[in-house]
Amino acid sequence: MPQYVYKAITPSGEALEGQMEARSQQDVILKIQEAGNIPLLAKELKSGFSLENMLARRNKIGHKQIGFFTEQLSTLLNSGMPLDRSLSVMLELSDDERLASMIEQVRDKVRGGGSLSDAMEEQHGVFSTMYTNMVRAGELGGTLEVSLQRLSDYLKRSKELRDAVVSAMIYPIILLVLAVGSLFILLTNVVPKFVPLFADAGIELPLITQVVFSGASLLQSYWWVLIALIVIVVVIIKSKLKEQDFRFAWDERMLKLPIFGELISRTETAKFSRTLGTLVDSGVPLLSGLTVAEKVVNNTVIRRAINNASEEVKHGAPLAHALEKEKSFPRLAQQLISVGEETGKMDEMLIRTSETYDGEVRNTIDRMLSVMVPMLVLILAGLIFTIVFAILMPMMNMSELVG
C-alpha cells in the first residue's frame, strides 16, 4: 500500500504531522477523523528523490528510537511506576524533539482515560500493528510491563539480525565499488595513452588489444550513456516491482538463487517465527498473530504461503499441517512448529525456530562471503591481467621489430 504524508489539528489545537500506510487518500482522512483530529493535508508520498520525501523521512521516528522508547518504558513500569508518571519521566528525559512530541501526545491521551494501545494507534505510522496488538494484549491481561519487555527483546533481536545482514554486505559492496572504480580509471585514463604510441609505430594490433582499446574508447566517450542505462533499468525494475504479478515472479526467482535464495528464505522465516512467537506468548490469538506476522515478511512468495496456511487454520487445520502444503516454507521450521503444537508450547518453539534461523542466517552469510569475496578478487584480477596482457603483446612485438 502507498504511504501518505498528513497534517492535522487535535481538538486542543495542537498540530500533528506524520505519515501512514493506507489504500487511498480518503482512508487517511477517515483514520485522522476517527482519532478525533481535524485533517488538513493528506498527500501520497511518491517514491524517488524529492525534498518532500527527504523531509518526511527526516521527521519520521525510526526503529532505533522506538526500541529506546520501549526499553525505557518497560524498565519504568517494571519498577512499579504508574503508566502516566512513566511517560512524564520519559518526556522530561527525552532530548529528541520528535520523540518527545510523540510521548507527550501518548501521555495526554492516557491521562484523558484512553488506553496506551489506542494512544499508540493514533500515532499513525509510528507503531506497527504487531506492536499495538501486543500492547493491547498486555493491557487486557494485566501484564503490560511483560508485553513491553517482550517487545523490547523482539526489537533488539530483529535489529541484531538486520545489522548482521547489513554488516556482512558492506565489505563485498566496498570491494565491488573499488573494483569497478579501478577498472574505470584504468580504461579511461591509462589505456588511451598507449593508443597513439602503437598508432605511430604502425604495427598490427592483436585482436585482444583491439577489443580493449575499442572498449576503452567507448567508455571514455560514452560513460554517461552507461550510467543513464543503469539508472533507467533500476527505475523500470522498481516501477515493475509495484505490480503484484511481476513482484511475485521476481521474488520466486530470488528464492531460487544459489546461497542468496537461502539467505532470503531463512531471514524471512526468522522474522515470521519471532513475530508470531512473541505475539502468541503475549496472549494474542493464533489467527490474529498470523495476520500480523504475515505483514513483516517482505518476500511475496513466502507471504502467500503464510496467507494460505492462515486460511487452513481458520478451518481448523493445525498450523504445521497447513504449512506442509507450502513448498516455499522451510521444512525444518514446519517440524519445529509441529513439535510446539503437539507439546502445547507453540510460543516457545516459535521463538526457538527464530533463534535457529538466526544462526542459519549467519552461517549462510559466512558461506556467501567465503564464495563472493574470492570470486570478486579473481574476476578483478582476471580483468586487470587481460588489460595488461593486451598492452604488453604489441609492446613485445615492437621490441622484436627494433631488435
Image: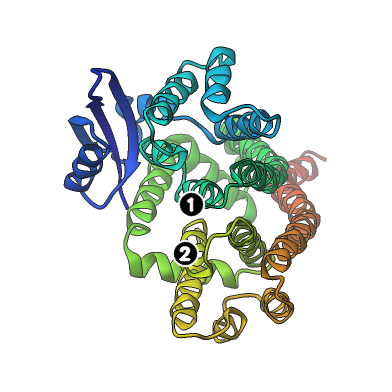
Residue at the image position 73 percent from the left and 75 percent from the top: 336
How many neighbours does mark 2 have within 10 angstroms: few (below 14), some (14-19), or many (20 or more)?
some
Between 279 and 12, which is closer to the camera in this rendering? 12
The quadrant of the image that shows the C terminus is top right
Mark positioned earlier in the residue sequence (2 or 1): 1
Say which quarter of the image contains residue 51.
top left
- Residue 150 image position (x, y, % from top left): 66, 47
Q: Is residue 86 visible?
A: yes
Up/down of 249 relative to 97, above or below: below
Secondary structure of the residue carrying tag 1 is helix
Between 371 and 365, which is closer to the camera in this rendering? 365
Q: Is residue 402 left or right of residue 12?
A: right
Secondary structure of the residue carrying tag 2 is helix
Question: Which residue position is annotated with label 2?
Answer: 288
Residue at the image position 48 percent from the left and 70 percent from the top: 287
Between 3 and 78, which is closer to the camera in this rendering? 78
- Residue 125 image position (x, y, % from top left): 39, 39
Of the residues shown, which amino acid type is indicated by label 1?
A: Asn
Say which quarter of the image contains residue 171.
top right
- Residue 365 image position (x, y, % from top left): 74, 55
- Residue 23 image position (x, y, % from top left): 25, 52
Question: Which residue position is annotated with label 1?
Answer: 133
Discs 2, 1 touching: Cβ within 8 Å: yes
Of the residues shown, which amino acid type is indicated by label 2?
A: Ser
Residue at the image position 63 percent from the left and 49 percent from the top: 209
Between 71 and 139, which is closer to the camera in this rendering? 139
Up/down of 298 relative to 21, above or below: below
Up/down of 17 relative to 252, above or below: above
How many neighbours does mark 1 have within 10 angstroms: few (below 14), some (14-19), or many (20 or more)?
many
Residue at the image position 55 percent from the left and 86 percent from the top: 325
